[in-house]
Amino acid sequence: MSRICRECKRGTLHVLGLGSYEDTIEVECPVCGDGYEIELDGFGEGGLESGEAYDAEMMRREADNVV
C-alpha cells in the first residue's frame, strides 16, 4: 500500500497516531478528510510508519496533557 488516499486517490495520508488499542495506525487524508486505521506496517515501509505513529501519539498526548 502506498500513502495515497484509498478514497479520493489524490491526497497523501498523514499519520495522526495510534488506534484505540495501539495495534493500528490512525491516518487521515488532508484532501477529502477521510480517516481510517491501517496495520502497523500498512504502508509497506518495513514498519517505519509505526515509529512515526508512536511519535505522533506521544505529541498528541502531550498536547492533551495525558502523558
Image (spheres, rainbow, N blue to C red):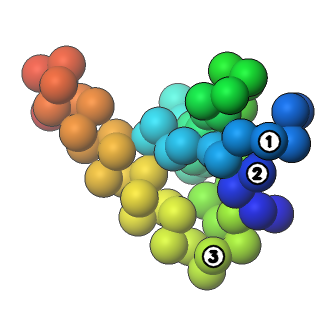
What residue is shown with label 2? Answer: 4
Numbered label attached to residue 45: 3
> Which of the two discs, 1 and 2, labels the residue nearer the N terminus?
2
* Secondary structure category for the residue under label 1: loop
Kind of residue at badge 3: Glu
Of labels 1 and 2, the one closer to you: 1
> Residue 46, labelled with which disc?
none
Asked whether the residues under the numbered discs 1 and 2 touch, taking CB atoms below 8 Å apart as contact, a structural biologist would say yes
Q: Residue at x 60, y 39 (%)?
A: 27
Element at badge 2? loop
Q: Residue placed at 63% from the left, 76% from the top? A: 45
Q: Residue at x 25, y 43 (%)?
A: 58
Looking at numbered disc 1 in the image, what kind of residue is underneath it?
Answer: Arg
Answer yes or no: is residue 21 visible. Answer: no
| Residue type highlighted by circle 2 | Ile
Residue linked to disc 1: 10
Mark 3: few, some, or many residues within 10 Å (few <14, many ≥20)? few
Residue 33 visible, this orientation = yes
